[in-house]
Image (tube, rainbow, N blue to C red):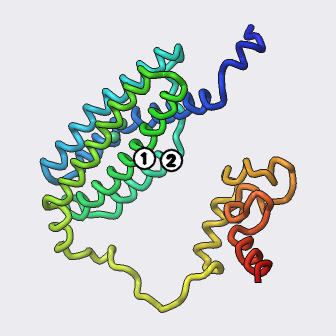
Amino acid sequence: METQAEKQTVSGLELFFQTMLQEIYWCELHLRDVLENMEERASTEELKSAFRNHRAETNDHVARLEKIFYLKGMGAQPLFCVGMQGLFDEGWQVIDETEEGSAHRDSALIVAAQKVEHYEIATYGSLSTLAKTLGLHQASELLEQTLAEEKNADSTLTQVAEKGVNSEASVEPASEEQLPLPDTGAISTESDPAIEAMKEATTGMDAGAGSKSTRDGTEASAPGSADALLMDDSGQPKGKKRSSRKKANA
Ligand SMILES: [Fe+2]
Ligand SMILES: [Fe+2]
């Protein structure tokens, strides 16, 4: 059984680092399939090969993470990543909303893939910094290798977009379904039914669950609702303080 002294040798930061590793491991495992799907749906050989090459690199990303788990004496356990799942959902939406074989779809696939790359760049950059702080220098080197490949994948996609895909898409006529509904001139406000529906949908999410007022058991609007995101730790609406300070100074 673990002694109290042994328990204290693991910092919160170390546990945070481990969780981030497990989440990006989940992402990389799924990205192999996602990149294969993107390759299938891209219409030019250049874009297909960008996705294919990065898929091969992604296998290395998985292997490097497994090496880091091994170095830390941990089993390689993926952990669901809500942020990346959102980007995957967005990618599927792009495929649904664009026409097969169109430059518009290629352009949108590039945007979706670059959002993923930027998420990975932020994650690997942060993980490498944390690894250095935690004295895990070999892990940091492995994370830096992957970070360089993510950055390279991102700039390759920019080059493909700039070389022709985007300009080709810019002269493709929009299909009937893509045309926006006529603008009625109505102003969207907080009372807009779409905003109300969004608030309804986000109620119960974890947002704000760690806020001071929630921990204290005091009322902070509905904890976890969209409203909670607009409250500060004292339960005051964000942005109100400045105007009251202004008043006090007046
Ligand atoms: Fe990756
Ligand atoms: Fe990547």
Looking at the image, residue 32 sits to the left or right of residue 237; the answer is left
Residue name at image x 13 percent, y 61 percent: 164
Residue 221's spot in the image, x, y percent? 79, 63
Left or right: 30 in relation to 3: left
| Label annotation for residue 200 | none
Question: Where on the picture, by quarter, is residue 238?
Answer: bottom right
Q: Amino acid at mark 1?
A: Tyr
Q: Earlier in the sequence, mark 2 or mark 1?
A: 2
Residue under label 2, please give it. 83
Q: What's the residue at 17%, 42% (across, down)?
A: 49
Question: Which quadrant holds the C terminus?
Answer: bottom right
SS for tag 2? helix
Mark 2 touches mark 1? (CB < 8 Å): yes
Say which quarter of the image contains residue 65.
top left
The number of callouts visible is 2
SS class, disc 1: helix
**Frontmost residue, 224 versus 237:** 237
> In terms of depth relative to the viewer, which is nearer, 68 or 128?
128
The one nearer the camera, 173 or 8, is: 8
Provide residue 166's location: percent of width, then percent of height.
Answer: 20, 64
- Identify residue type, mark 2: Gly
The disc at residue 119 is 1
The quarter holding residue 153 reads top left
Mark 2, other Cα within 10 Å: few <14 / some 14–19 / many ≥20: few
Residue 117 position in % (x across, y down): 35, 46
Does the closest atom of ligand 1 sit within 8 Å of the Cβ of label 2? Answer: no
Q: Taking 14 as reference, is 46 above or below it?
A: below
Ligand 2 falls in quadrant: top left
Residue at 44% x, 22% y is 137
